[in-house]
Amino acid sequence: MELLERGARCGGALETIRRDGFVIETGADSFLSEKTSAAELARRLGLGAELIPTREIYGKTFVVRAGRLVEVPAGFMMLATAHFGPVFRSSLFSPLGKLRMALEPFIATRTSSDDESLDSFVTRRLGREVLDRVAQALAGGIYTADPKHLSTTATIPRFVEMERRYGSLFKGMRAAERARASKSPEVSGARWSLFQSFRNGMATLPETIARRLGESIRTGTEVVGMAPTADGWRLGLAAGDSIDAEAVICAAPAYAAARIVSPLEPAAAKLLGAITYASAATVNLTFRESDFEGPPRAFGFVVPAVEHRRIIAASFSSFKFEGRAPAGAILARAFIGGELHREMMNLSDDEMVAAVRDEFRALLGVKAAPGITVVRRWPDAMPQYDVGHLARVAEIERLIAPIPGFAIAGAAYRGVGSPDCVRSGEAAADTIFAKLSTPK
Ligand SMILES: Cc1cc2nc3c(=O)[nH]c(=O)nc-3n(C[C@H](O)[C@H](O)[C@H](O)COP(=O)(O)OP(=O)(O)OC[C@H]3O[C@@H](n4cnc5c(N)ncnc54)[C@H](O)[C@@H]3O)c2cc1C
């Protein structure tokens, strides 16, 4: 087995920098507990004791409204709630917006089962304010996507199903709450917070795997094409040489996979190439607690596009997870760019830091200069799940299935979260074993 990696290190969007007592995440900073594949892989690798929960005492998330941080109402999940009380008491929505939301159980159910954009789904069921004030930033923000294009069936299937099954998100949320309450704490996963990470950062996972694989990893090796041989494949490398393999899993982004499969299955390559990507950047900054008038004792905040600010979200990493900063210090990080703020990617690193400092000054009152600053760009790193995404992926899978000894995996297809990517890799491995054990 050989792992061919274009970059200088393994791990892709999982990258941790450990410096001066800080554990700085430049890419993903946590993963959803309820999707268990990442934690299960960690346990198989002997990393069970390294898994850490979020610090629930700081488990608040804020949304920027009119230049101020307003807490997401208790029980509000991305775009819906099972309890209108906290929503009505919140200053996040206008009285009209709240009224519109309260009408949700009475809104007719959509008859078509065709895919729909986040924009259409949320405005139809809950009104424009929920879209503009929260859903775009909370749900669309995960994909750094334009809600006018983001597929609901690919990204928020549970809410689509709630409408179909209960005729209302409010009723669906109530039913989900009752189902959770009837389960024992063990089954409902009460021991684990909604998100988890690793004591020493998310890169613990790829670093541990890389140590296990040892010499079989070839970094600085970009695959640009593949052609059949008598007993497998010949992979063409950007450097001009090639490698022979009995079977291949392509876990590169869809645009790289498109190039690689193009000579074998041009129709699949065309569909792969049609999966577009957004770019983003993270800016990590360290401060002293005394730099803040009131330290941000929360997980972070999101910034709706209607606020016209220069960051799309921020995490207070050292409040979110234990051990991310030395005592008396704060580690914060901002997210920049995405589909709705493409122009931000044209800034230099210094300009990005200046923009984040401006926003932190305006929103958090921090005037002090940061200690450490880490800017990390992620060009073309966020696959966009546009309306029709799942049908496109199903067609890609159908076209690729007959190719012997070949499978695809990664964030471009059936989930962008780290657990989704682990599951996708494992499914690809199963496919390859099945294909190799089938007589030709
Ligand atoms: C900034 C950021 C923050 C995120 N935050 C979270 C989060 O908090 N929680 C969460 O669950 N998810 C998060 N995600 C999403 C998640 O981390 C990613 O979707 C996931 O890690 C992607 O994994 P992947 O293996 O599909 O792709 P990648 O991590 O992009 O890995 C693809 C690898 O393929 C290599 N490669 C590309 N082309 C070639 C080629 N031709 N030949 C050889 N190698 C090639 C690349 O160098 C790269 O190492 C975040 C993503 C980003 C970018």
Image: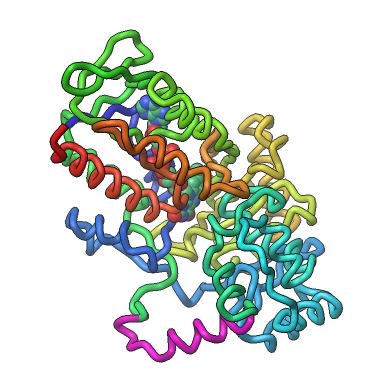
Residue 403 part of the magenta segment = no
* Magenta: main secondary structure: helix
Q: Position of residue 26 (x, y in %)?
A: 47, 44
Residue 7 visible in image: no
Rendering quarter of residue 382? top right
| Rendered-image quarter of ligand 1 | top left
Q: Is residue 211 above or below residue 149?
A: above
Q: Is residue 315 above or below residue 268?
A: below
- Quarter of the C terminus within the rendering: top left
Most foreground residue, 121 or 364: 121
Residue 414 visible in image: yes
Q: Position of residue 400 (x, y in %)?
A: 37, 35
- Quarter of the N terminus within the rendering: top left
Most foreground residue, 322 or 195: 195
Name the residue: 29% across, 33% down: 406
Most foreground residue, 105 or 97: 105
Q: What span is in magenta?
A: 170-187
Name the residue: 52% across, 34% down: 271
Query: Does residue 350 appear left or right of residue 161 in this picture?
Result: right
Rendering quarter of residue 290? bottom right
Q: Is residue 221 above or below residue 250?
A: above
Q: Position of residue 98 (x, y in %)?
A: 79, 79
Residue 182 part of the magenta segment = yes
